[in-house]
Image (cartoon, rainbow, N blue to C red):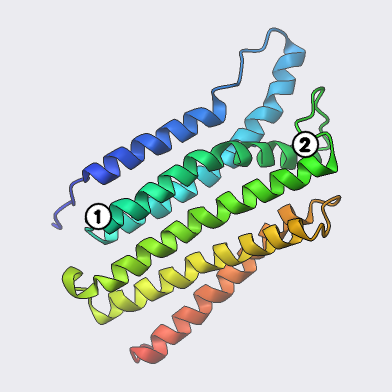
């Protein structure tokens, strides 16, 4: 039976930060005083579900890295600290974007809209995009550091191939985030929320990347 790796202090501290981030997503919700307010709050719950799912995805990527590589050196702490700092910064833009998406998708109009002008919408896309970029850029730096420690970690050829795959995987997120930020800066499609919808590119790009790396792995290791 394989030995279960103990949770390091880095992981324990990181989990506490992620837990705080999840709390910040919902802490402002109040108990409704009437049935009408209850129905109104359901839209907030849907928005919370979207933002919470994204936060869990980021946490799962973080957990996967530390399950794969037992790194606790100063460089790992530094890159991980950047990631946690950005995650805390990213929480509120994520929440606002989720509320906006739910409002537009379900044709729900809030009595006190968060965004009231195109300029504010542009600023929200910009802040969200920069947070998104730096979150996944932090993962890229962590995996690049793991690759530099391949000998120390005693990584096999297959595991080194996997690290390179994870590097490219997270660069796709950075690339899409950069497109969103560029569209925002150039004022392209702001009125139609194009900088937000552009994140839909992640699905086909990640699917293509998965197939590409799988074929490359089969060719490299002579697998059938």
In percent of width and height, residue 90 lies at: 55, 43
Give percent across and percent down for residue 35.
73, 12
Q: As displayed, is residue 45 above or below residue 148?
A: above
> Residue lying furthest top in this view?
33
Q: What is the crowding at mark 1: few (fewer than 14 residues within 10 Å), some, or many (at least 20)?
A: few
The correct choice, above or below, for 56 with respect to 195 in the image is above
Q: Residue at image x 70%, y 17%?
A: 38
Disc sitting over residue 74 in the figure: 1
Q: 63 or 106: which is nearer to us?
A: 63
**Left or right, 148 with reference to 102:** left
Q: Is residue 217 left or right of residue 176?
A: left
> What is the CA distance from the residue labelled 2 to the residue labelled 1?
43 Å
Question: Compared to 33, does 65 lie above or below?
Answer: below
Query: Which residue position is annotated with label 2?
Result: 103
Give the total of numbered labels: 2
Circles 2 and 1: CB distance less than 8 Å?
Answer: no
Residue 208's x, y, as percent? 58, 75
Residue nearest the viewer, comparing 26 with 127 = 127
Q: Earlier in the sequence, mark 2 or mark 1?
A: 1
Q: Quadrant of the C terminus?
A: bottom left
Q: Is residue 147 above or below residue 217?
A: above
Q: Quadrant of the N terminus?
A: bottom left
Residue at 52% over, 29% down: 24
Q: Residues within 10 Å of mark 2 (few under 14, many from 20)?
A: some
Which residue does the image show at 35% across and 71% down from the upper left?
Answer: 163
Looking at the picture, tell me which residue is in the foreground, 152 or 205. Answer: 152
Quarter assignment of residue 15: top left
Q: Position of residue 84 (x, y in %)?
A: 41, 44
Name the secondary structure under disc 2.
Answer: helix
Residue 52 appears in the figure = no
As helix, strand or loop, the secondary structure at mark 1 comes to helix
């Amino acid at each position: 039976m394989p030995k279960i790796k103990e949770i390091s202090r880095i992981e324990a501290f990181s989990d506490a930060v992620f837990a705080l981030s999840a709390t910040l997503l919902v802490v402002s919700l109040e108990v409704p005083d009437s049935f009408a307010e209850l129905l109104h709050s359901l839209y907030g719950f849907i928005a919370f579900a979207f933002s919470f799912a994204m936060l869990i995805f980021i946490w799962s990527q973080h957990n996967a890295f530390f399950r794969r590589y037992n790194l606790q050196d100063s460089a790992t702490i530094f890159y991980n600290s950047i990631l946690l700092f950005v995650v805390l910064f990213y929480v509120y833009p994520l929440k606002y974007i989720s509320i906006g998406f739910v409002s537009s998708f379900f044709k729900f109009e809030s009595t006190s809209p968060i965004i009231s002008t195109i300029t504010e919408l542009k600023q929200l896309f910009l802040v969200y995009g920069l947070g998104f970029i730096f979150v996944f850029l932090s993962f890229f730096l962590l995996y690049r550091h793991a690759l530099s420690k391949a000998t120390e970690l005693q990584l096999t050829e297959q595991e080194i191939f996997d690290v390179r795959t994870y590097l490219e995987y997270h660069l796709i997120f950075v690339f899409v985030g950069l497109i969103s930020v560029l569209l925002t800066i150039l004022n392209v499609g702001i009125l139609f929320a194009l900088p937000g919808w552009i994140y839909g590119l992640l699905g086909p790009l990640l699917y293509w990347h998965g197939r590409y790396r799988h074929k490359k792995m089969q060719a490299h290791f002579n697998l059938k």
